[in-house]
Image: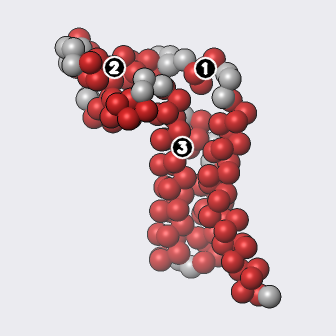
Amino acid sequence: MIKHLKTITFFALFMLPFAVRLAYMIDTWDQDYIQTPILVSAAHHYFAQDLLEGTDAPYTVFRPPYYPLLVSIIYRIAGVFPMAVKIFQWILGALSCWLIYWLTLTYYGRKQAVIALIICSLYAPSFFF
């Protein structure tokens, strides 16, 4: 019984970062500020489109190309769909929660690792931006 409870608890904790991000995605899917790139995300979006099309972008002088390169790779795989970039970032954010869990477990212990995982999973800026 105890082993079964530990398995359920581990699965619930494993799914927590993904569930929080999925709930946020479902809640904000039809919002204009999520679907439309604005400000910095718009600059990255247009830069990534230019990289994807192979045109010379005028903003290469003041923007480092690494993030727009990543965005253009995602656009090449999923099509020019800004929400695909957000989904990719949410997956990376959930995986980073597990990295924090693993590091905390390695250096401090299980109780502290679970607390760190819960805090990281519920930290709003990690899935809002």
The answer to whether 72 appears left or right of 88 in the picture is left
Please state, as top left, top right, bottom left or bottom right, where the N terminus lies in the image: bottom right
Q: Amino acid at mark 3?
A: Trp
Residue furthest out toward the top: 58
Residue 33 image label? 1
| Residue 5 visible in the picture | yes
**Residue at 49%, 70% in the rendered image:** 102
N-terminal label among 1 and 2: 1
Q: Amino acid at mark 2?
A: Gln
What whole-number distance in Å separates the C-alpha atoms at marks 2 and 3? 21 Å
Q: Amino acid at mark 1?
A: Tyr
Q: Nearer the viewer, mark 2 or mark 3?
A: 2
Give percent across and percent down for residue 118.
66, 60
SS of the residue under disc 1? helix
N-terminal label among 3 and 1: 1
Give percent across and percent down for residue 127.
58, 41
Give percent across and percent down for residue 36.
54, 17
SS of the residue under disc 2? helix
Q: Is residue 72 above or below residue 14?
A: above
SS of the residue under disc 3? helix
Residue that numbered label 3 is attached to: 90
N-terminal label among 2 and 3: 2
Q: Is residue 108 above or below residue 72?
A: below
